[in-house]
Image (cartoon, helix red, strand yellow):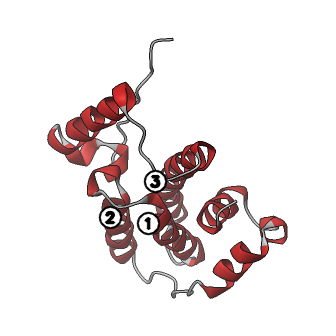
Amino acid sequence: MSPTLSLVLAALVGPGFESELPTGAKAANVQKKTEAAFTSVREAREAVSEVLLASNRASGRDPSETAPLVLAAYQRVERSENLPAVERRQLQSRLRARLSDQRQTLRRREERGGPSLGGGVVNGAQELINLIQTTIAPDTWEINGGKGSIYYFPNR
């Protein structure tokens, strides 16, 4: 299991998962820096929006690169006890959705045995999804912090 996938799984599964991580993943987990809790709702919202924007599929950045950023933001929100509980849950929900998406992408990539994006219809479908999410009300899509989602279901 890759260290990034392990970190994402650790965030989704919760405490105690670290003891099951491979040695490399434990080292990566220890190396990550801990940032201070957010001091205001505005600061938290801006930081979460920034991370979600940087980690969306349309940004072209690899999930293995951005998953640690999303995880760090999630943990920072979790430590921010001065945020109202409702706000904290909403921000965590948005970050959790992104982590889940990244986990699925990384898991599929790992199952295929590499970073290739595949080809044929699936690749074309992903390009179409990316086009839709970047041109039609971009702020409303889950990858950009909204509530909308879109999936490709192949005919079998």
Give the percent coordinates (x, y) of residue 72.
52, 74
Q: What residue type is labelled 3?
A: Arg
Q: x, y (%) of residue 58?
A: 28, 51
Identified at 28% across, 57% down, the residue is: 59
Sequence-wise, the earlier of marks 3 and 2 is: 2
Q: Which amino acid does label 2 sit on?
A: Ala
Residue underneath mark 1: 66
Res. 151 in view: yes
Q: What element carries label 1?
A: helix
Give left or right: position of 40 versus 95. left
Residue beneath disc 3: 94
Q: In which quarter of the image is residue 124?
A: top left
Cβ atoms under marks 2 and 1 closer than 8 Å: yes
Q: Nearer the viewer, residue 47 or 13?
A: 13
Quick check: 44 above or below 144?
Answer: below
In this rendering, position of residue 8 left or right of residue 22: left
Quadrant in the rendering for residue 136 = top left
Nearer the observer: mark 3 or 2; the answer is: 2
Amino acid carrying mark 1 in the image? Thr
Q: Residues within 10 Å of mark 1 (few under 14, many from 20)?
A: some
Query: Left or right: 130 with respect to 3?
Result: left
Q: Report the residue marked by disc 2.
A: 54
Q: Nearer the viewer, residue 154 or 85?
A: 154
Return the x and y of residue 105 as percentages of the image width and height: 51, 47
Query: Earlier along the polypeptide chain: callout 2 or callout 1?
Result: 2
10 Å crowding of disc 3: few (<14), some (14-19), many (20+) = many
